[in-house]
Structure formats: C-alpha cells, structure tokens
Image (tube, rainbow, N blue to C red):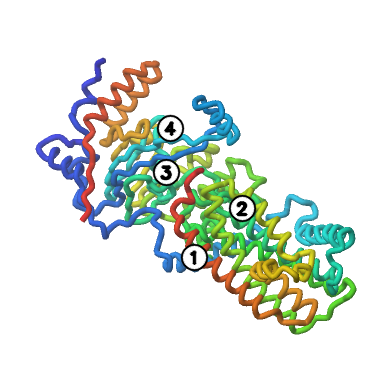
Amino acid sequence: MTVPSDITSTDHDLGPDGGSQDLSSAPTVVIDRAGLTYTVRTLTAPASGSPKRRWLKGLRASRMSRVEALRPLSLVIHHGESVGVIGTNGSGKSTLMNMITGRLRPTTGTIHATSTPIMLGVNAALVRTASGNDNITLGCLAMGMTPAQVEAKRPSIVELSGLAGKLHLPLRSYSSGMASRLQFAIATSVDPEILIIDEALNTGDAQFRDRTRARIDELREQAGCVFLVSHSLNTIKTMCTRVVWIEQGELIMDGPPAKVTANYRKYTKLLSEGLKDEAAEFRAMRQKSLRLTTVTWT
Amino acid sequence: MSVHGSTTDHVDAARADTVVDRSTVSRVGARPHLFRYIGQLFTYRHFVLFDARARVAGSSTNDSLGRLWMVLNPILNGATYFLVFGILLGTGRGIENFIGYLIIGVFMFRYTTSAVTSGSKSIVGNRAVIRAFSFPRATLPIAVNVRELLSNVPTFVMMFILILMIPPAEDISWTWLLFFPVLALQFIMNLGLSLFLARMVARWNDVTHLIAFGTRAWLYISAVFFSVERFEDTPLLIGLMHANPMFCVLDITRDALLYGGVGDPGRWLVLGGWALGSLVIGGIVFWQAEETYGRAQ
C-alpha cells in the first residue's frame, strides 16, 4: 500500500502550533493514563456451559459482558488550545469527553483540570412535567447559580432559545427540537473556562443553527480551552489548533489539524471502500509513530 | 503551521514528557470531603426547594382530578382496610375510636411509603440531569423528600378534618402540636432511608422490587389496622414492635390526636434514634459513591 507523502512527512506527531505554544504555562487539563472498562448486562442467551447452568442463566435472562471503552491514554492540554476530537462512531470519543467532565470516573488513571469542564450536549436534561420557565430556573440552579443570577440570565436564555411565549407550557408539549434548543440555551448561559462541545448540537432549523453557531463562537473566544467533537473535518480544521484521533478506544494520532484530518480522511476512505485490513494496517502504522505523553507530577 | 527545524525535537520532547504541578489542578468530579459536601448541599438549597416545588406542581397533571388524588387515595385505602380489618376480620375490637386509629395509621404510613419509594429512585430516575450538570447528587434525594412532604400537606389536612368530623369526633387540644415534631422526625428518617436506598438502587436496580415488598411487609407489622395489645402475651413481639420506628410514629400521633397524651418517652427515644441513625448512616453511604452516580448500568 502506498501512502501519499504529504501525510507522512514527519516521523512522529508534533504538538499543535509547534514552538509558538508556551509549553511552560500550567496545563489546563491533564489526562494521565486514563482508561475505562465497564461491565454491561446483555440479553444474549449464553451458548456455553452445562444444560443446567444454561437454564439458570436463561432464567436471569441477562449476563455480564466486559467492554473496554477506552484504553489508557495520556494527554496534556494547555491554556488557549482548541482540541478537535475525531473518530468513527463508537470509537470512544464520547466516553473520553464524559470522563473529562467528571461524569464518568476512569477505571484506571486520573483526569485533572483547573476547573470543572462544562459540556454542551443534546441530552434532554430537563424535567418534562415542569414548564419551560421552571426548567430554565432548575437548570441554572443546578449549575450553581443563585436565584438573583438566574433572573439576570433569564432574558438572554429566553432570547437564545427563541421560545418566548411558549415558556409557560410544560416541557412534554415541546417538540424534541424545541426541547434541545432550550437545553442548549440553558447550558450555554454560563461562561466556562473549559468547554466541551458535542457535534450533535447543530440540529434544528437554519435560523437556530446560526444563533447556535454565534453563541458557540462567543463561548469559544471566552473559554481558556475548548474540546470540539465533530464529524465535520472542515469545522475541525477551521476551529481547532490541535486534533486528537481516537479509534476503537485507542489514541491513534495527536497533532496539527491539517495532518491528522488528512490521515483520518484516508482511513475512512479505506473503510468505505471495504478495505478493512488495509485500514487496520494503516491505523496501526499511524499509531506506531505516535509519541506517548508521560505525565510527571511534582 | 511551521514546526520544522531545530526546535522541533525539543518542543516535541517537552510535550511528550510533561511535568505538572499538582497544586494547579484538581481531579475532575472528585468527591469533596464530607463536611465540605454538606456545605455544598447548603449552597444548593434553592435548587432543592425549586425542584421540589416544580415537581409537586407538575406531578399529577396527567389525571383529570389532579392533586385531589393525594387525598382520595388514602381515603379509599382507609375505607378498604376498614371494610376488611374493621368489619370482616374485626381486628379493631377493643380499640377506642378505631376509625381515627385507622385513619392516622393509613395516612401517616402512606407518607413514609411514598417518600422512601420515590427517594430510592431519585438517582436512577434523574440520570439525564446527573449527566448534564455537576452538582452534589444528594440534592436529588433531599429534593424528593421535600417534594413528598409538600405534596402530603393536603393529605395531612384531610386527616385532621376526618378525625374532627367522623364520630366519635375528637376536639383539638394542645397535644395536637406534637404532630409537628413527630413529622419532623419522620421526615429525617425517610430522608436517611432514601439516601441509603438511592445508592443501592443506583448500583443494583433489582433492589426496587425488594423495596416494594419491604414497605408492604413493614405496613403489616406496624399496627396500622390492629392493636399491638393482641401480642401482650409475647414479650418478644411487643419488644420488636416498640423498636419499630413506624410503630413509634403512629403510636405517638394517635396518643396526641386521639387520646390527649404526649406519647411514651420510650417511643420518642426510639424514633429519634432511628431518625438520627438513618440520616447519618444513609448520608455517609450515599456520599461514598458520589462519583459513580453518572455511570450507566
């Protein structure tokens, strides 16, 4: 297999911005050999064991399976970096992001940060029986605001959600698009230092998409450090200063956007052509030249 | 991006082996020290109160009779028990004002059942909120218990009205004030049990089945529709009854509302001990697993 020379020009991956980054500054996020393995209950009938054992297991109608969602990996992110996270579906991107926010605790290793990272996602974290207004209050209070701060933020949340006039209705009367707009408006009402943006945010109609984009840009400028999970490589290239490629729970590449996205594009192209073995080989090769970060604590 | 040249290797090496000062960062999602945790809970008091109120308002909007069910439900329950135990089985014989006795038993017990049942589901039922925001998770079981207390206010008012109206009608005396400290202790006990069970259910969802069974068994052994005097010949059973906090709640309330007494000091002691003990143990048990509640099962 031949690989174009433009994406193998350096032997190992370099940090974004190279020398322009002030690496002596204190890191904002430190991921130290963090990995996650979890057990899930599955409904599959066991095919092994004696008939008696099988009958017993069948009675429980579930068994435990171990899933290695993320192999231990280390990353150090400094102030001012915008990190794009790419990988095919099920690669472990969301797991990593959930670990960075502290919602999932890694089963090995640790993740440290200068402040609690805030994630903007589409999960409807709202109370369906309560009204839109009450959900704004609840969400803001859950983020630790005082009632006075909530009232100060309310007008801008209402405006961003574009739901003025519907906020007295209970949430279960909203469409899923309306609910996610409200969720987005609530979640972005704080100005976090470390911000994680999930790709799926860009749902909704064109008008809301523009408003979302504007607000994300605003937040991105204010935040000290941003993680952007996206399938759009163009978005990643324009917004990020560094890209991390995760595949099958493993860190494959970590480096400048142009180079990592080019390699990723090549990999997905191989996959879509059905060349699974070649793709795996290519991935393994890129991973080999990855220089692993080690963290030393003082 | 120009990263080529003599500095490249140097820069890369710096990135590859990073020295981090431990004092500048803290572990994400780390569980704070117990006393700091309690302090955090206090700063989230507005969240607790608002969450409780919002959910009370929205809880029964699916039924056309709405919050009326909060009152109708215990009345229908009480009527059933009266029919079965009072008339068919005759367990009420020898009890002065058996209807009042039964009403207090059913209404007060129902409060603990619903508070503990919904409190135990406060984590699994709110996983979306837990994953969306980082806040001390104990606010959820606390909010559920505040909600249950608020939504049971009409139930308690109905209980007073029934006791005053149904013959033999009782008069209001100063001992009725004792209802409030009893309710406070009951609230604390419910909260402690909710905290403990919320962690259990978050870990093993199967526990919900045991809770449904457990509250039912507890109902039958708490002298809700029979008198404890029928066990007079078995000191062991009497002793167990007296150690049962729900029996203490019912016994003190009946004494205060129906019989003009202030309750046996032993009952107050047992109830107080259970309330405090369950809050301390439940609180610590819940806090210990603080970091695990966002995990999917």
Q: Identity of the amino acid at label 3? A: Ile
Residue depth check, mark 4 versus mark 3: number of the one nearer the observer: 4
Q: Secondary structure at mark 4?
A: loop
Marks 4/2 in contact by CB < 8 Å: the verdict is: no
Residue indicated by mark 3: A197
Q: CA distance from mark 4 to mark 2?
A: 33 Å
Q: Secondary structure at mark 1?
A: helix
Q: Report the chain holding disc 4.
A: A
Q: CA distance from mark 2 to mark 1?
A: 25 Å
Can you tell which quarter of the image residue B55 is in? bottom right
Q: Report the chain holding disc 1.
A: B
Q: Identity of the amino acid at label 1? A: Leu
Residue toward you, B274 or B54: B274
Quadrant where the C terminus of chain A lies? bottom left
Residue depth check, mark 2 versus mark 1: number of the one nearer the observer: 1
Q: Which disc number belongs to residue A132? A: 2
Residue toward you, A66 or A173: A66
Q: Residue at x 75, y 77 (%)?
A: B255
Residue indicated by mark 4: A90
Are the residues under marks 4 and 3 on the same chain? yes
Marks 3/2 in contact by CB < 8 Å: the verdict is: no
Q: Residues within 10 Å of mark 1 (few under 14, many from 20)?
A: some
Q: Report the chain holding disc 3.
A: A
Marks 4/1 in contact by CB < 8 Å: the verdict is: no
Q: Residue at x 43, y 31 (%)?
A: A89
Residue depth check, mark 4 versus mark 2: number of the one nearer the observer: 4
Quadrant where the N terminus of chain A lies? top left
Marks 4/3 in contact by CB < 8 Å: the verdict is: no
Residue A46 pos. (x, y %)? 52, 28
Q: CA distance from mark 3 to mark 2?
A: 23 Å
Q: Residue at x 39, y 56 (%)?
A: B30
